[in-house]
Image: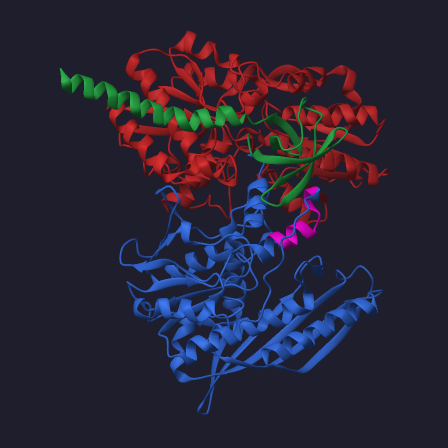
């Protein structure tokens, strides 16, 4: 239940935020989310911002996989070495 | 587009597919219980890419699919009242009730409007003071806070012509019920945006009681494949737990503000799920304090007796027990242009996806 | 359950096809109609004539990139041009709601004249009706169009010369028109700078044909999107189609709005896009020629005709997955899931 799209906050006006998704703009409600600022990326679902996207965690997710790959290659090399 | 394209990267996808193939050769059945996941899996053609030993089951994660015929019949009854404007999310208008649907009623002159948000429904209520605006509240924990906010706003703005007809449901009872019913599930791809709201603790009961892992997944191919990989690893290591793959938006504690809004307006009740029957404390009813906005309490209407279509096995399909082409109505009587059951109407429904993908 | 017409019957997808097949063709059936081409192909003496008709009921009647009048001329011209015909003459009939603004009518009619001039067609006959307030939504326009075509181009409408190895080409980014309309209907109060791609493509098409390119099929991708054309083409001609999703251009702003609403751009209407099937030998030449035209700058080869999975159009997704391109069942509805 889930169509939520990462949208960038362009401006904030009280409990509403003007967000942009690839150029389409929408005035989303911030009633369900605190602590956001301009340039943050948030998930919009049926007109409401429901969570901020963590850039750090996003990078971590993309990186984690490559790290795993490196660790496993390292282990493979060590095993072969023995 | 940021936070979308990077998670559709083919190089990462290929790497993940390779990793999934090498983790385990056991026959594994993973179930997703989120319409968004069903949609994404079909859209990106993921089943085509997975190794043979991994089967993806589509569970009751499509809110349109699990909505009862009785709910549709009552919505149809509301739509026939001359002063009522029905406001609803998209797919619901095509779901067949016992003898009609909102789409058909619209063609007969009923005022049925598709809205993007409950906030649009509130606006319609303000612009039409002589009409009663009924908003059809379907969806799980992702969407329930929006409906709650809508009701909360209606109270604050002293609206007297705005009502919500709630069919909101919560996920965990259904996830447990499926395993109780004997459906073979080796792991759950847990709903990403439900978890944004609720946090991860709501799934703890599943691994601890059933030994079935839950990985909370995002919706892009990299997310889904990474979650499948994580579930396979749990199975290989015999170590079942709740994990968050979708870390960029799912926090263990979830969105507390949204949870508070939900708790302010809604209370748990037993609810009927297509395919699962009545599950204890699985639905959301509007609290007494907000009963002025509860369509069920405020708008008396006669609803026809519910008639289930003979031969429709949506219930068993929703549980992953039968495949769409096990249904004798599938593709013959029940098609995407002429759906009989809810599983065919919704684009996230198993039958709809099967019909379009496997035709 | 259905005893009444639903909006979906007009959306260009399966319901429309069923209505046409089970009602109109059932009663009107003849050898010309049964060809089911965009334009009817008629022979009178030694001349080959393409004859088409269309009705325009778009709401809102003014939208970014055009209006209902411009749409009427472009749609009719394109229907003729994709049959390989040179569009010559158009009729324009107006059904106007009582109380409609004369100023707005003036803007619409003058833009029709401007578009017809650009396309090199004459509006030679027409009709005007006014109905009581409430009996039509502001303005409806019906057109008919006549074009002349060479016998060599007769094969284009049916696509019966298509064979495995041929290439599938599009002249630019998809879904602009449908999303421009969605945005201008204020659904959900989205604001966007998406403009309709509404345009007369006959000059661009003529350049390809005059250059002697081996064009085997053309269709303009209107309601139902490119998915409907591809699905119909594969089914009607019993050929296999494979499309590479990464080669299909979609503008960023259109993508954004589609993602927000849960729309698939493949099913969204266009008014300035054509699907061309050309021989492998000539495909690059077709693309190069179209790129020289203002309406083909982003032309690209998007797929192939294949021997396998005859009757089905398959999409290879950006991540290497596969799915069937099916026809739209009813209208595309915004999702929440």
Q: Position of residue B333 (x, y in %)?
A: 45, 45
Judging from the image, what is the letter of the chain drawn in blue? C
Magenta residue check for B55: no
* Colour of chain A in the image: green
- Indicate the colouring scheme: by chain
* Colour of chain B in the image: red
Which residues lie in the magenta part? C179-188
Residue at 44% across / 69% down in the picture?
Answer: C218
Q: Nearer the viewer, residue C157 or C201?
A: C201
Q: Position of residue B255 (x, y in %)?
A: 61, 19
Magenta residue check for C187: yes
Determine if residue B210 is in view. Answer: yes
- Residue A77, by quadrant, is top left
Q: Nearer the viewer, residue B240 or B23?
A: B23
Seen in the image, is B191 located left or right of residue B107?
A: left
**Which residue of the protein is positioned furthest toward the bottom in this rendering?**
C45
């Amino acid at each position: 239940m889930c169509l939520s799209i990462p949208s960038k906050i362009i401006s904030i006006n009280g409990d509403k935020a003007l967000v942009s998704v690839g150029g389409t703009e929408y005035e989303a409600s911030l009633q369900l989310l605190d602590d956001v600022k301009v340039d943050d990326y948030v998930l919009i679902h049926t007109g409401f911002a429901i969570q901020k996207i963590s850039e750090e965690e996003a990078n971590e997710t993309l990186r984690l996989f490559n790290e795993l790959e490196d660790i496993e290659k390292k282990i493979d090399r060590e095993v072969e070495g023995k | 587009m940021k936070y979308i394209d990077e998670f559709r990267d083919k190089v990462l996808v290929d790497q993940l597919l390779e990793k999934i193939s090498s983790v385990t050769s056991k026959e594994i059945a993973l179930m997703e219980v989120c319409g968004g996941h069903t949609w994404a899996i079909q859209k990106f053609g993921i089943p085509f890419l997975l190794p043979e030993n991994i089967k993806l089951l589509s569970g009751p994660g499509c809110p349109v699919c699990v909505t009862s015929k009785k709910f549709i019949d009552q919505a149809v009854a509301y739509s026939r009242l001359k002063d009522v404007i029905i406001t609803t999310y998209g797919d619901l208008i095509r779901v067949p009730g016992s003898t009609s649907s909102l789409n058909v009623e619209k063609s007969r002159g009923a005022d049925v409007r598709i809205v993007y948000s409950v906030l649009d429904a509130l606006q319609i209520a303000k612009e039409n003071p002589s009409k009663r605006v009924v908003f059809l509240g379907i969806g799980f924990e992702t969407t329930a806070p929006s409906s709650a906010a809508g009701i909360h706003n209606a109270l604050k703005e002293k609206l007297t012509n705005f009502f919500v007809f709630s069919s909101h449901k919560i996920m965990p009872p259904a996830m447990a019920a499926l395993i109780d019913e004997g459906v073979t599930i080796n792991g759950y791809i847990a709903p990403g945006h439900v978890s944004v709201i609720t946090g991860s603790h709501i799934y703890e009961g599943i691994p601890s009681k059933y030994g079935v892992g839950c990985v909370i997944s995002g919706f892009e191919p990299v997310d889904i494949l990474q979650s499948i990989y994580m579930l396979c690893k749990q199975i290989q290591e015999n170590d079942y737990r709740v994990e968050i793959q979708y870390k960029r938006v799912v926090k263990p504690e979830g969105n507390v503000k949204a949870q508070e809004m939900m708790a302010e307006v809604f209370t748990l009740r037993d609810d009927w799920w297509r395919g699962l029957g009545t599950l204890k404390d699985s639905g959301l009813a509007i609290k007494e304090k907000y009963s002025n906005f509860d369509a069920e309490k405020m708008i008396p209407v006669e609803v026809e007796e519910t008639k289930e279509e003979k031969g429709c096995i949506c219930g068993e399909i929703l549980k992953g027990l039968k495949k769409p082409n096990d249904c004798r109505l599938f593709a013959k009587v029940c098609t995407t242009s002429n759906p009989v059951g809810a599983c065919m109407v919704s684009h996230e429904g198993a039958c709809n996806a099967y019909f379009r993908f496997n035709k | 359950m259905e005893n009444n017409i639903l909006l979906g019957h007009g959306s260009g997808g399966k319901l429309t096809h069923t209505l046409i097949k089970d009602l109109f063709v059932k009663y009107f059936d003849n050898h010309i109609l049964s060809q089911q081409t965009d334009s009817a192909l008629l022979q009178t003496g030694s001349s080959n004539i393409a004859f088409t008709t269309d009705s325009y009921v778009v709401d809102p009647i003014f939208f970014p990139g055009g209006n209902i009048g411009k749409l009427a001329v472009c749609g009719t011209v394109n229907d003729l041009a994709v049959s390989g015909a040179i569009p010559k003459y158009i009729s324009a009939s107006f059904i106007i709601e009582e109380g409609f603004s004369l100023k707005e009518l003036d803007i619409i009619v003058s833009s029709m004249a401007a578009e017809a001039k650009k396309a090199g067609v004459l509006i030679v006959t027409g009709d005007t009706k006014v109905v009581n307030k409430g009996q039509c939504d502001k303005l409806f326009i019906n057109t008919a169009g006549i074009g002349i075509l060479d016998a060599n181009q007769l094969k284009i409408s049916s696509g019966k010369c298509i064979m495995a190895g041929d290439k599938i080409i599009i002249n630019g980014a998809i879904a602009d028109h449908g999303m421009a309309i969605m945005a201008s209907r204020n659904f959900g109060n989205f604001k966007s700078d998406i403009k309709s791609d509404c345009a007369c493509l006959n000059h661009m098409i003529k350049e390809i044909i005059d250059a002697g390119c081996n064009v085997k099929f053309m269709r303009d991708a209107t309601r139902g999107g490119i998915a409907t054309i591809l699905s119909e083409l594969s089914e009607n001609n019993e050929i296999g189609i494979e499309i590479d999703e990464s080669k299909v251009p979609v503008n960023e702003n259109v993508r954004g709005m589609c993602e927000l609403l849960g729309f698939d751009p493949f099913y969204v209407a266009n008014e300035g896009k054509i699907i061309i099937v050309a021989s492998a030998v000539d495909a690059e030449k077709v693309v190069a020629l179209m790129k020289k035209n203002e309406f083909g700058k982003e032309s690209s080869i998007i797929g192939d005709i294949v021997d396998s999975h005859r009757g089905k159009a398959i999409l290879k997704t950006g991540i290497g997955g596969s799915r069937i391109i099916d026809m739209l069942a009813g209208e595309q509805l915004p999702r929440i899931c």
